[in-house]
Every structure is written in structure tokens, then in C-alpha cells.
Amino acid sequence: MKICMLTWEFPPRIVGGIARHCLGLSKALVRENCDVHVVTLDFPGAPLYEDIEGVKVHRIRIEIGHPSFSVWAFLFNHFIEKKVASLSRDIGFDIIHIHDWLTAPSGIASKYYLDKPLVLTVHSTEAGRVQGLRSPDSYMIDGLEWWMTYEAKRVIVVSDSVKWELQNHFRLPQEKIDVIPNAVDIMRYQKDVDREQVKRRYGVGPYEKLILFIGRLVPQKGLEYLIWAIPSIVQSRPEARFIITGDGWSKNHLESLATSTGHGEKIRFVGFISDSDLVELTMSADVLVVPSIYEPFGIVALEGMAAGVPVVAGNVGGLSEIIEHDRTGVLVYPRSAESISSGVNRVLSDSGYSRWLTQNAKRKVQEIYSWDAVARKTAKVYEEACSQ
Amino acid sequence: MPDELYFLCILHNIGATSPDKSLTLEEISRWSVLEPEKARSNIQKLISTNYVEVDFSSGVERYHVTADGIRKVLSMYS
């Protein structure tokens, strides 16, 4: 089966979880004997064409811009469409697969001119991301999201919580939806890491506890609630040190907030770090905190579980589906600094409990969240889409 | 959103994302409809945070968004 996958982010253009999802899925689809072509946007240093373990990656240059993000998005869709049209002269695609609204215009157009079924994966919705529609851009994106679910033959969602959103917000019939969770590449965490050395690299001493946050610095990720919890965590565990990775438009505000806790010297914002550094840092952490207030899936939590680090996460959306409280992690009340503090302290104060959580979590990841399992389910969805 | 980040988004969306697509201060002012002084002040802030780089290869100062700058912009929209 020949797949044309359209995505606005693909490594090394990594923003959120979509890039890693598309890479993991496409490589596993190749192992399922699919011919996978990914059409995506260019990125400094990345070639316009490359073969990654059998995945053919075509990167497009966007020749025209516009100050407005929405206009820019429609313009890059035009260039994606042009690339798909050009590729389709030599490749008889069977399926067009898009991820979220950003490639919806080119995906929908390709569906019509290639006369092939469109499969859509919804990773999150605008209404969820911005917690309520308030701007013209949000209304436009929400409309596009409805439109793409209507145009797609099959809609894949990453969790039951997103399925619920689509059924309630867009009135999408449940028969059209398949829930296929995200996955992690477990092999990335099968390596020896000198935790002491990694901690030292980030200014954390061998006897200090590394509390890690990974994510975009935007309100949806709930980092402010972790920052508000810091005084209480430090009171119980003076050796606690906090490393914040990622970037986003709330960074300045969050840095000021961190300083205002009076524990600024224990908190470091390290920005974006490379994928290999991130794996080492995760494996060296004593706790991974995922304080999101909206999380359609929560791949960061899954990565923490695979890395063998205890995860303390907000009891929302996909996180509630991935983590079994008190068995594979600790679920805390969303938007509650007190609950986060209590969860972190519990994990840090009982190494037996912490070990029990990580052992169970690792086992669960290995059993359920592998890319090969996701690819098999996705290939089945492709077959259904082609046969309908 | 701070002014300079809004400005970074504009630089990204108009396509100044690599040395060969870098733009002069005048071009950026026209695109962003900002006075050159205001545009320059934003650019200086963005250079100090490594989100924008200067390119001198054409003999004129031209500016473009760096890889970190691109990620910063994308993180605002995804």
C-alpha cells in the first residue's frame, strides 16, 4: 500500500508530539510493507529529500509568505499540494493521511484530484488547546477541524478523550472514529546512562533530586501549577532541583513566576535540547511532572514511563487513560499546586513505591504502546478506508 | 504575547527563515508595517535570545529566523 502522509512537523522540525508520532508511525508502517512518502516543510540543515529507514521524506520550501499565520498556513498548503501532485505522476498513492488541521487544505484537495480516500489523525482540537474559542483565527481553525473530520473517510484519534471531544463538539458519528494511541520507541531508552554526570551537566548535584518538566511553555501544559508547588516541595525536600525543558510564548511570564517563588536558584529553564540529550535527561530524572490542564494524549508521560522515571501527571484527558493511579504513576488534581506537591513528595519520599511504579509502567509501555502495534492498527484503518 | 515574539512570528511567516531568504531592515519594516527604529529594537532583542541571526554575505545587513526561532514560533501555534 502506498501512503502519502502530510504533516507540518517532522524531525528535525520538532515542535510537539506530532513530529515524533509521524516518524515512529511511518517507520513502523514501512516494516508493515507500506511504501510511505512523507511530505512536510523544510527546516534549516535538513535535506529536501531523504530516506529514513525506508520512509521517503520530501521537504518543501515555501516560496511566498505573509505576516498572518493563517494566510501563511494556507500558502504552505499550496506548496504541499503542488508536491503531492508532482509525486503522484510517478507514484500511485492509495491513501492520503493528514495530521491535524495544518495540512487539512492540501489533504482535502489531494483527496479530490487523486480520487483517493483521506485518513485523518486528530491529535488535539483548537477548542481544547486554547480552552475556548475567542479569536477569529480560532474560529477559522475550529471550522477547518470540523471540515476535515467531514471530508475524511476514517478519523483516527489518539485517546478516548479526543473521541469524546469530536463526538460532542463536531457531532462526528462514532462509527467513523478509530482510537489508536500514540506509542514510544522503547529502544531509545535501552542504554546505559551515567545519571550523576548528566545531572552535573544541568547543575544538579549527585544527592539532589532532579524534578523534570518537558513540554511547550504554553498555558495548556500547566507549568505554572508546578511552579506554584515548588515552595511546598522544597520545604519537604530541600534537595529538590527543577529542570524545565522546552520553549513557548509564556516563557518570560513563567521565568518571572519561578523567580517570584524565592527559589529561583533551584529552577533552571534550559530551552529546547536535542533528542539524545532529552533521553539522557529523562532517564536521569527522579520525577517527571506532567501538570497539563488539557492533554489529548500525553506522549511525554509515556516517554517518562519508558525511561523508567516515576511520572506525576494531571488527571486529565489522555493522561488519565495512560496512567493507572498508584500503579503506573501518580495522578494529581489538575490546576492544583497542592496536589502536585503532594504527588511529588510521595514519590520522592518512598523509593520502594517509586520503584514499584516504574516497574509497572515500563511493563505497560512494552505491552501496549509500541509503534509496531500502532502501525498494524493504522494499516487496518487504511484497508477499511480503501474498501468502503 | 510580548511585542518581539509577535514580531518574530511575522518574520517567520513572511519567509525569512534561512540566510538565502533573509531580509533587510527596510524590507522587514515594510512587511511588518513598523517604523524601522521599532523593527530594529525588536530585531536586537531577538538576536540577543538567538532567535534571529544577521547575515552579512551580500554586504548589507540582512536578518533571518534561526532554527530555535522557528521552533519558538511553531510552539506558539501548535
Image (spheres, helix red, strand yellow):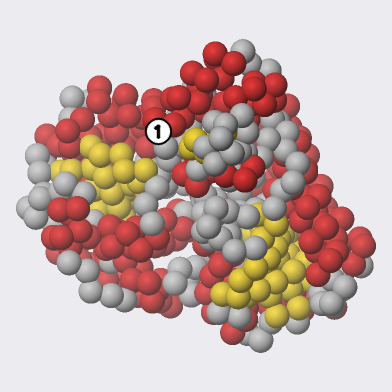
Identify whether A140 is placed above or below A350.
above
The residue at the point 70 percent across, 21 percent down is B30
Please report, as a chain letter, where disc 1 is located. Answer: B
Of B33 and A235, the residue lying toward us: B33
Of A346 and A226, the residue lying toward us: A226
- Quarter of the image for residue A226 reads top left
Image quadrant containing the N terminus of chain A? bottom right
Left or right of residue A148, residue A116 in this image:
right
* Residue A314 in view of the camera: no
Identify whether A51 is placed above or below A222.
below
The residue at the point 60 percent across, 75 percent down is A51
Q: Position of residue A220 (x, y in %)?
A: 49, 38
Of B12 and A261, the residue lying toward us: B12
Q: Dot 1, crowdedness within 10 Å: few (<14), some or many (≥20)? A: few
Q: Position of residue A240 (x, y in %)?
A: 15, 43
The residue at the point 63 percent across, 55 percent down is A42
Left or right of residue A312, residue A154 in this image:
right
- Quarter of the image for residue A322 reads bottom left
Identify whether B35 is placed above or below A26.
above
- Quarter of the image for residue A251 reads top left
The residue at the point 40 percent across, 47 percent down is A272
* Residue A229 in view of the camera: yes
Image quadrant containing the C terminus of chain A? bottom right
Q: What's the amino acid at mark 1?
A: Thr
Q: Position of residue A131 (x, y in %)?
A: 57, 33
Question: What residue does disc 1 label?
Answer: B49
- Please tell me whether mark 1 sits on a helix, a strand or a loop: loop
